[in-house]
Image (spheres, coloured by chain):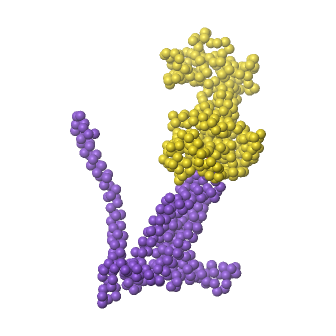
Chain colours: A purple, B yellow
Amino acid sequence: MNAPVVPVPAAGVQAVRSTKAGTRRRWTPYLLLLPGLLWLGIFFIIPLASLLMQSLQTPVPNGLAGQFQQTWRFQNYIDTLSQPNFYNAMIRSFTYSFIATVLALLIAYPLAYAIALRAGRAKPLLLVLVVAPFFVSFILRTIAWKQVLGAEGPVVSTLQALHLVQQNFTIYPSSAAVIAGLTYNFLPFMTLPIFASLDRLDTRLVEAANDLYAGNLVAFRKVTLPLTMPGVVAGTLLTFIPASGDYINSELLGGSVNTTMIGKVIDSRFLVLSDYPAASVLSFTLMSIILAAVWLYVRKAGTEELV
Amino acid sequence: MASPQTNGDLWLKDLTKTFGDFAAVDHIDLHIPQGSFFALLGPSGCGKTTTLRMIAGLEEPTSGKVLIGDLDITYAKAYDRPVNTVFQNYALFPHMDIFENIAFGLRRRNVSDLDKKVKDVLELIQLSHLARRKPAQLSGGQQQRVALARAIVNQPAVLLLDEPLGALDLKLRREMQVELKRIQMEVGLTFIHVTHDQEEAMSMADTIAVMNNGVVEQLGAPLDLYERPATQFVASFLGQTNTLQGTVVGPDGDFTVVDTACGRLRLPRTELTGSVALGVRPEKIEFAQTAVSGVPDGANVVEGVVTDASFIGVSTQYIVRLRNEQEIAVFEQNLLFGRRALVGDQVTLFWDPRHSFALAAQ
Ligand SMILES: Nc1ncnc2c1ncn2[C@@H]1O[C@H](COP(=O)(O)OP(=O)(O)OP(=O)(O)O)[C@@H](O)[C@H]1O
Ligand SMILES: [Mg+2]
């Protein structure tokens, strides 16, 4: 490499050319990343920065409603987050979303398991059925749940007919109805990633576990579940994150101040009351908490501590 | 557990497995003594894996029985059997390190002294230094040894090995064969080794069962199977064979005389009558100096013309066309300088009649 005894011109040309190719190769990944980075920059980083700045603004003295100036007032955070209806909505959002995520996981895992490993030729059809709700708009589906859970709906009348509940029993509107709606609406997001990881699972490993004295339950806990953890993590994130910010379900199926989720609060602060700093504080806090929770969760899941 | 008198012999009794109306394993009877190295040899798709899976409890037999000693385990769950498997594809748990892979079976049974047992077996397979690696970070041969360790550490009554060397290159394969044999002698377990490599089966096993189309064609020690194959299939599956069609003439002392298109030939006394095939292995056949001299008394003699000779190092392989236009193979060790015969030479071949065997004619 360093000092060829006789410099051969051809080799020199070769070397130059290969260096050029090397440079090109080194830059190719960045070029390919460029559109994505631009997209992220324009539609995520810049709005995020402006949101952060907005959360530190105060009203213009003697100005009109909705007029704010940049004063970097960090006290905004304390003022906003100490208001009971705000932090209650925040806590409620995470509670609903957490319960819905757990329920969705409990429903989706067996469902995905059956489709991936037991369905045989019905597999494609069942998969289509899982995503079939997407053919109807989110709002319409949620409104439909009003009917399902309503006083004359099938759930309540069945329970009444079986004399399991009293005649004046209702589900809708309530927290339970909101959680049911969230669980239903995000179920496909939970099911699909879990299905994908179960579908890839090498079932011979389960046989190997059986062969090594593991009963079916132990084989599941020690082999199937750890190997499908990536699907579970993806599914729970895809459910928990959007469910935390969702407010369609709480609006349509809850409908009272006691079921309000944080999304609705932010929505009305921004669009109805034009209280931009408070709305920004809440948005930013919501996002930070979700990020922190996700970070902790992924770290734990990554080290198999969740199993 | 079986008591010492009834011991740990494995019995397959009239074992059958059908998929739809196809019999993958067709009424097999086998007795495998405790501590033996048993090989199941047969071509692809003959039912070897299916047989093993029924012994392991991963496949339920359609009919028949599996016993260890006099313990009937036909319908016992896989996790209840004193049987472990080294799978065709290893099936190591990718999310566990080597130590945990090996400890898996021990942990399930809360065995005491787990640490020491795993370390001992790691030493046996000479991989102690890699205990904390994940399976994906090992070479094929190392993974194979881990799969073996994961099974033998449980001291099962029977160890099943499903073509464990199939994925290895020839050199590593030979090394692992020696290693496997050493480990089997050291731990003294019953090994049932499935393979479709006849050399592997012959070099390792005490007893070989040759399977074909779901049935056991012949069972015996490697030498017996090779020297006295009972069927055309066994004869051709275990090495190369020449067969000459003929008719039984009658007994002659310890021999039976057969009339073939190339003259009267003799083979060890057989019960077969009428049309038979006389078989002889290519390496048993020798060249005579001339048509009249150099042929020992009582040898089987045939004449022909050399049509092909290929030098392959340790031996030269000739093709000789006999009088009836049939071509046979002859292997000669290269003991001489130069060739024994050249293409086109008229040659006289002979062999000891004890090296011939009778096969039912097809
Ligand atoms: N689950 C199944 N359903 C239907 N047929 C099967 C099934 N498992 C095996 N077979 C058939 O049974 C026969 C024996 O299969 P088996 O796996 O035992 O062969 P093998 O001797 O192990 O072959 P190889 O050397 O290729 O591994 C094959 O013809 C196979 O197609
Ligand atoms: Mg097989």
Residue positioned most to the bottom: A62
- When asked about the image quadrant of residue A181, the answer is bottom right
Q: Is residue B50 visible?
A: no
Above or below: residue B8 compared with residue A245: above
- Looking at the image, residue A278 sits to the left or right of residue B70; the answer is left
Q: Picture coordinates of residue A22 (x, y %)?
A: 30, 49
Q: Point out the residue furthest to the top here.
A: B293
Residue B322 in which image quadrant = top right
Q: On the picture, is B29 further left or further right than B165?
A: right
Residue A114 versus residue B9: which sits nearer the camera?
Answer: B9
Residue occupying the point 47% across, 78% down: A90
Vertical placement of B143 versus B171: above or below?
A: below
Which residue is pictured at 53% across the width and 43% down the height?
A: B128
x, y percent for residue B355: 66, 22
Relative image position of residue B328 (x, y in whole percent): 59, 24
The quarter of the picture where the C terminus of chain B appears is top right
The spot of residue A196 in percent (x, y) is 52, 60
Report which quarter residue A144 is drawn in. bottom right
Q: Nearer the viewer, residue A198 or A101?
A: A101
Tell me what residue is drawn at x 62 percent, y 12 percent: B295
Task: Tell me, yes or no, if residue B282 can be seen here.
Answer: yes
Which residue shows up at 57% across the image and 49% down it?
B101
Foreground residue among A55 and A165: A55
In the image: residue A266, left or right of residue A11: right
Q: Number of numbered discs present?
A: 0
